[in-house]
Amino acid sequence: MKKGIIGVAGEYFVAAELSQMGIVATLTLKNTPSIDILATNLDNGKFVNIQVKTMSLGNNAGWRLSKKDEEPSSILNYYYVLVNLKGIGLIPEYYIIPQNKLAKLIYDDHRLWLAGGANRKDTTMRMFDPYRRLVQKEFGEPYKNNWDILGLI
């Protein structure tokens, strides 16, 4: 499946999950920086801004992020929803993480990786891999499939 289609699929899965909870979820235009979905609970006025990152089918190496994902943000109520598409007919797995907490994790983790060997060179790639990295698994457990983190209901 093509990369762009994978990303859109993840956005639609997130919007569908939110819609099932009675949340209005609107996908933004593709040129909107940082935010893929605006979600609002019309009953209580709570809202969140969501960046969706989707792991492609067959990828068992976590989510590839970039240097910009480790930078703290001033966007209010800003979350990343990391989507693991398990395959056709299977329910995806989600990690719903406040942006600034994920940014700190990948910032710190990248610094540890750089310090781990004299031949390591800095790159713009960052990773969130709760499947192969124990620290990231422990960090991610409270956020796994935990939609309550958004505080919308």
Image (tube, rainbow, N blue to C red):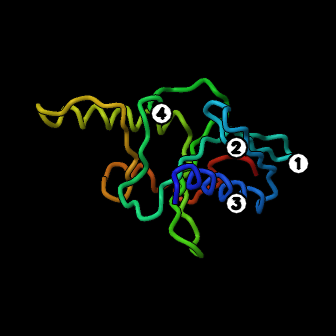
The amino acid type of the residue labelled 2 equals Ile
Which residue is at the far front?
Answer: 2
Q: Nearer the viewer, mark 3 or mark 2?
A: 2
> Which numbered disc, 4 or 3, marks the residue that appears first in the sequence?
3
- Give the labeled residue for mark 2: 37
- Specify the quadrant of the image occupied by residue 109: top left
The amino acid type of the residue labelled 4 equals Asp
- Specify the quadrant of the image occupied by residue 48: top right
CA gap, disc 1 to disc 2? 19 Å
> Which numbered disc, 1 or 2, marks the residue that appears first in the sequence?
2
In the rendered structure, are the residues bearing label 4 and label 2 in contact, judged by CB atoms less than 8 Å apart?
Answer: no
CA gap, disc 4 to disc 2? 17 Å
What SS does tag 4 mark? helix
> Which numbered disc, 1 or 3, marks the residue that appears first in the sequence?
3
Q: Position of residue 115 (x, y in %)?
A: 19, 32
> Which numbered disc, 4 or 2, marks the residue that appears first in the sequence?
2
Q: Is residue 149 above or below residue 33?
A: below
Q: Nearer the viewer, mark 1 or mark 2?
A: 2
Q: Position of residue 10 (x, y in %)?
A: 60, 55
Q: Which residue occupies the foreground of this view, 13 or 111?
A: 13
CA gap, disc 4 to disc 1? 32 Å
- Give the labeled residue for mark 4: 69
Please rate how many residues cluster around mark 3, counting C-alpha atoms within 10 Å: few if below 14, some from 14 to 19, many from 20: few
The amino acid type of the residue labelled 1 equals Asp
**Which residue is found at the position 78% from the left and 58% from the top?**
19
In the rendered structure, are the residues bearing label 3 and label 2 in contact, judged by CB atoms less than 8 Å apart?
Answer: no
CA gap, disc 3 to disc 2? 12 Å
